[in-house]
Amino acid sequence: MKKSKPPREAKSAGSGKPGGSAKSPSAATGNFVWWPLAAGLGALILAFVVYDPALNAGFVFDDRFLPFFAPNLSSNLADWVGSIRPLLMFSFWLDFVLGGGANPYLFHATNVVFHVITSILVALIAAKILDWAGVAGRMRATLAVFSGALFLLHPLQTESVAYVASRSENLSVLFYYAAFTLFVYRQTASMTILRAVAIVALFGAAVATKEHTLTLPLLFLLTDFFWDRGGIRKNAILYVLLAVSGVIGAVFVLRVLRAANTAGFALQGLSPVDYFFTQCRVLWIYVRMFVLPFGQNVDPDIPVSTGLIDHGAIFGLVALLAAVAAAWIYRKRFPLAAFGVFVFLLLIAPTSSFVPIRDVLAERRLYLPFVGLIFIALEFLRRIDLRQATWVSTAILAVCAVLTYQRSEVWASPLALWEDSVAKSPAKYRPRFQLAYAQFELSHCAESAQSYEKASQLGPVDDQLLIDWALALDCANRPDEAVAKLRQALQFRPSAHVYSQIGMIYAKRGRTQEALAALDEAEKINPRYEMIYVYRGNIALQAGDRAGALREYQHAVDVNPSNQAARDALVRVSR
């Protein structure tokens, strides 16, 4: 059966020229030589303007589990790059070395630069797809620029750009779109070996940065099939190389999923079927936020659909099936929109189909499939005249720029970020816990203790919550309550850390015997925990025993030479 082919020969709206090969008078006379460079520079400046509030923001949430947040970290590359996402970790290492340490500005600025480059790639991809759809001349140039600018300025992108840990999205999609750009800009159906090798190398770089980019070979197949480019048979070598790379990548992904505790088929409490039903609803939330970007939340409270009827999952599923059917039936009349539907569903499938992920919705997951929604938007814009398309595009981009700047202000500090999330997810445990921690870091001790108390009412009370809650109570000058929380934490798991914290609290209040008794218990559990000796040294120093303090501080340094608190105390007393 012969494949249907979208009408490349149709006239494009507003262009007045048949086909996709027509050139505008400006292009013919060379006037277009300067504007791509100007557009790129303008995109860079505009991106730094709209993301300016977040550029000096501190590290937040999962940032604190990345290598650059580890204390006393060396600049040795081998300490950073391992088998998991090596190119991502290499980029973090470069920022660490160039910034002379964990400089938040440089990490954020790098994310912005990657985002700008990816936006330019989106414009190039859109220009080529528009050409295949029969859009030419100034309309094609206008819509291509709009595509890149929408990707650059849409507020849904803030989590992928302002959140350092989301560089996994940011950088992997850059490699992914770069490979796709090389693919669509081949001069003939059959590409050169050099181009094929470059595409495979970029594909490998994308997968080595984040695993969801494994869909790239399928995107190539979809593109060749949908636009009838004739490259499936003529580029057998490319597809063989991609198939081999895909198998290797799939093995790598399975290995990552087995080691992950937040995703995979072994995830407790969330089955693949439940996750699928939930995603039938979540996908439409993504689409709504693309069209009407309000209610953004770093930690949304989305209930899980444990059945097809639960929370209206069946309506989401029916709507998805209807959208796919309509895209197939009307693919000739609305080729851009139809292609966009298939691209969106393909690219979002790794995170929003059957593989369970603990967080059922995250804005950063829209970064890769965002281009599919852009194609759908282009279908509408191409059907109005150039003047109207320009004004509509400008208005949309202006609104997006304002909203992105406002959302960047929320990402400007952990306190603002978690206050926003708590306001939107008041019944969820994690935002409240994170808010309490942010308040504690700013020495808002009473507010922090209150937030921990509210968190204890929303979720499971474990030793980590109790320890952090105790430190907030101690900071708020409520030592007896703090010790009570720490003793409660000991019921979960006796540890040298908890006993040493009890000793520290007693010592600050002059209750020396109780403090020393707690530190003795800590030493019995783990004599290699250096903070025991730091706190003992503090007690000796309070008692005027300088020699005893020196001995304890030296012991702490001997146990862990990299402990900065012990080294500083030793130097201070030695002087």
Image (tube, rainbow, N blue to C red):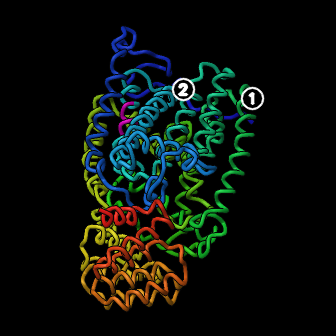
Q: Residue at x 50, y 46 (%)?
A: 368
* Residue sitting nearer the eye, 288 or 404: 404
User: Compared to 335, does 74 lie above or below?
Assistant: below
Q: Could you say which quadrant of the image residue 493 lies in?
A: bottom right
Q: Residues within 10 Å of mark 1 (few under 14, many from 20)?
A: some
User: Compared to 15, does 562 lie above or below?
Assistant: below
Task: Determine the residue located farthest toward the top in the rendered image.
Answer: 29
Is residue 229 rendered to the left or right of residue 88? right
Q: Please provide the residue range marked out in magenta.
A: 145-151
Badge 1 amino acid: Ile
How far across and down, in percent of the image, does residue 139 sit? 37, 26
User: Compared to 168, does 187 lie above or below?
Assistant: above
Q: Residue at x 37, y 91 (%)?
A: 514
Q: Main secondary structure of the magenta part?
A: helix
Residue 150 within the magenta-colored segment of the rendering? yes
How far across and down, in percent of the image, does residue 134 sit? 49, 26
Residue 103 within the magenta-colored segment of the rendering? no
Question: Pointer 1: what residue?
Answer: 237
Secondary structure beneath dot 1 equals helix
Q: CA distance from mark 1 to mark 2?
A: 27 Å
Q: Are marks 1 and 2 in contact (CB under 8 Å)?
A: no
**In which quadrant will I find the C terminus?**
bottom left
Q: Could you say which quadrant of the image residue 217 lies in?
A: top right
How far across and down, in percent of the image, does residue 1 sit? 75, 36
Is residue 426 rendered to the left or right of residue 77? left
Question: Pointer 2: what residue?
Answer: 8
How far across and down, in percent of the image, does residue 66 sit? 48, 56
Q: Residue at x 37, y 15 (%)?
A: 33
